[in-house]
Image (tube, rainbow, N blue to C red):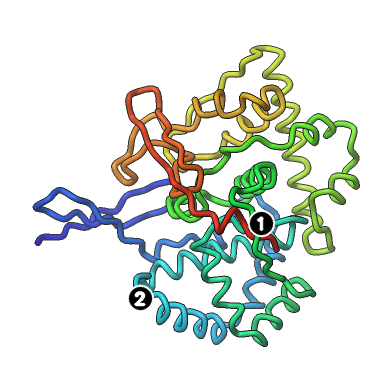
Amino acid sequence: MDVFLTIAAGAGILFAIAYFSGNGSKKKVLLKESIPDRLGLLEVVPASAILNKLENALPYEYINQVKLRFLSDHPEVSDDEFEWRLFELKRYFFLNSVMKNTPMFSSKVDEVWHEMLMFTKQYESFSEKYLGKMLHHTPNLEPEPAPQQRAFFDWVFAQLFDITEYTWQAWGDFFHYPMDVEVLQRIESLSDVELKKQFFNVNEENQELVNYLITKLRSQLRKAQDIYTMDRKGSFGRPALFGDLSGLSLVMVFYSYYYFDEYWDYTQVYAYSNQAHGTSGCSAVFCGSGGINDSHNDGGGHSCSSSCSSCGGGCSS
């Protein structure tokens, strides 16, 4: 059976896709060499100090022990996929240094975290070096993700990181839930100190990043208000690729603020790329392997189903 490798660009990341002749099926092969540098942090994000501290807190010896044990316990997972899962877990750890409440919404990523916990001393050392305290893992027994927690997780994630194809496979649908409308309505009256106290962990190393996120949130809310004065239903461009979320956080803020109860009815219009790209078999931006079990239609006759596995509804740290 002949195998042809094609390199496909998606959301700024390269994936190798093996095409098998005969039955016309496709099998995607993730390459660890394609994992973005610097955790895929966007260039404008002021986060070098946090990134360096995270990497220095995870010595090679520890990670290699975790990897060997994980691959032994999960023979169905390739070496490359483990590296992608670890990549997303590091992003999750990064979020923990900034966000006050950071649920775990990915069973794939959570499995690697569980393996790290098995090495008790090394994990405690990592937590202390990185956060100055123990990063606990507490399962969330709720059957569904907490919608507003997931919404804020998605918003912060999109401000910081490139969204790769594997990102939405691991974390499930992005921006499916609206942000807390009561919080958005109070943004103008809340001071920076109050916002930090409610949402963020603030220290000397991450203060610039937290200020950056607060500025972005206030800016998007002002833009949403300006858009509403011109077009009450809102009008936004659709992404060019399934992983292009650069403008979708503004869509999220707008419809959360003005149409909270009808959020997905409006937002799903912008959830699909302009063209279906063969790398995914689905043109939906929000469509991952996600836990909502929705079937979406892009308006052009292309439907896509997502079925999210989200660690039992999310795990709280």
For residue 200, side relative to residue 179 (left or right): right
Q: Name the residue under label 2.
A: 75
Picture quarter containing residue 180?
A: top right
- Quick check: marks 2 and 1 in contact, CB under 8 Å? no
Q: Residue 84 placed where, x, y %?
A: 46, 64
Q: Crowdedness of circle 2 by 10 Å Cα count: few (<14), some, many (20+)?
A: few
Q: Quadrant of the N terminus?
A: bottom left
Task: Report x, y in % for residue 52.
Answer: 66, 70
Which residue position is annotated with label 1? 103
Secondary structure at badge 2 equals: loop
Q: Compared to 251, does 197 lie above or below? A: below
Q: What residue type is labelled 1?
A: Pro
Numbered disc total: 2
Residue 57 image-quadrant placement = bottom right
214 vs 104, nearest the viewer? 104
Compared to residue 119, the image places residue 244 above or below, namely above
Which numbered tag is attached to residue 158? none
Mark pair 2, 1: CA separation = 27 Å
> In the displayed structure, would residue 204 be above or below residue 63?
above
Q: In this view, does 202 lie to the left or right of 85?
A: right
